[in-house]
């Protein structure tokens, strides 16, 4: 298991003279969560694996918020963070909120559109033209969502390097920010229908999202996720113009839409993460303004 920066410099508590010689029990717990989230970063290409990481991230932020409530932590952070560090910390938290909001909105819109298509399929089995129009609207909505995701991924590329000699609590918060951004990259890539390659840079990921042609109407894509499969099956149905070709095509569309809806439901924990991000930012702002 890879060690996190909290252990790399004689442990988290030893990096600041203002912290006690024995670490608070929360510190090794935070370090353990960080290591666990970083240990399998590449394994985040399916909704169950992303959901598991979102759950781990929620637990991590609960621990972080508890640490921020400790008087010693507040005193240390308020006294030893300089203006540059404060700006980086606050800008980083805004970035997390923006990106998490994009992911949440994209999932909510996809869930609404998916449920609408399923309802139309149940009511209008013989109305190919009506379904085709709705399918086109769904794909148009997907295109708009992908544009927002591309913009967010470009935003993610501007990660700041962590300086060597910084206050320990600040270092911990930046490390938490780093694992959160990595998970959001995986989540956005999943929603967009693009598999994120291990250890890819932000720029290479953006380039892949902008130029990928893995999903086509005839698509021969491998290891496709639920978003990709729905895109492909709808393209196939639309290609038959005003009529749905067969009951098999309709049933296949229903199956894939149901799978997509289930996958989206698994990822609804992102809303809880967003609330925790807001809570952490408020805690930090209160500390720094004290």
Image (cartoon, rainbow, N blue to C red):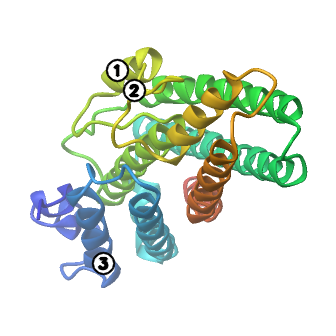
Residues packed near mark 1 inside 10 Å, few (<14), some (14 to 19) or many (20 plus)? some
- Helix, strand, or loop for circle 1? helix
- Quarter assignment of residue 168: bottom left
Q: Nearer the viewer, mark 3 or mark 1?
A: 1
Above or below, 248 against 274 in this view is above
Please give the label number shown on residue 203: 1
Q: Residue at x 27, y 52 (%)?
A: 41
Q: CA distance from mark 2 to mark 3?
A: 29 Å
Can residue 51 be seen by looking at this rendering?
yes
> Which residue in the protein does label 2 denote?
157
Q: Nearer the viewer, mark 2 or mark 3?
A: 2
| Mark with earlier residue (2, 3) | 3
Classify residue 8 as left or right of residue 173.
left
Q: CA distance from mark 2 to mark 1?
A: 6 Å
Please give the label number shown on residue 29: 3
| Mark with earlier residue (2, 1) | 2
């Amino acid at each position: 298991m890879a060690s996190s920066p909290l252990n790399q410099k004689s442990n988290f508590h030893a990096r600041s003279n203002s912290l006690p010689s024995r670490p608070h029990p929360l510190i090794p717990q935070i370090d353990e969560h960080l290591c666990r989230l970083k240990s399998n970063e590449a394994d985040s290409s399916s909704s169950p694996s992303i959901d598991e990481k979102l759950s781990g991230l929620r637990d991590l932020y609960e621990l972080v918020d508890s640490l921020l409530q400790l008087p010693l932590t507040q005193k240390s952070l308020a006294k030893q963070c300089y203006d540059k560090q404060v700006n980086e910390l606050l800008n980083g938290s805004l970035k997390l909120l923006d990106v998490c909001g994009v992911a949440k909105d994209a999932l909510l819109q996809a869930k609404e559109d998916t449920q609408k298509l399923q309802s139309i399929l149940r009511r209008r089995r013989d109305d190919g033209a009506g379904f085709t129009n709705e399918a086109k609207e769904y794909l148009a909505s997907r295109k708009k969502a992908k544009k927002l995701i591309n913009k967010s991924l470009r935003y993610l590329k501007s990660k700041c390097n962590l300086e060597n000699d910084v206050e320990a609590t600040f270092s911990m918060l930046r490390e938490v920010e780093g694992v959160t951004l990595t998970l959001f990259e995986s989540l956005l890539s999943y929603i967009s229908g693009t598999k994120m390659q291990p250890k890819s840079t932000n720029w290479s990921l953006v380039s892949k999202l902008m130029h990928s042609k893995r999903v086509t109407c005839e698509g021969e894509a491998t290891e496709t996720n639920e978003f990709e499969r729905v895109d492909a099956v709808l393209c196939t149905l639309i290609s038959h113009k005003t009529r749905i070709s067969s009951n098999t095509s309709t049933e296949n569309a229903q199956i894939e839409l149901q799978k997509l809806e289930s996958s989206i439901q698994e990822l609804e924990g992102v809303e809880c993460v967003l609330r925790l991000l807001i809570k952490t930012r408020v805690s930090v702002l209160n500390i720094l303004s004290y």
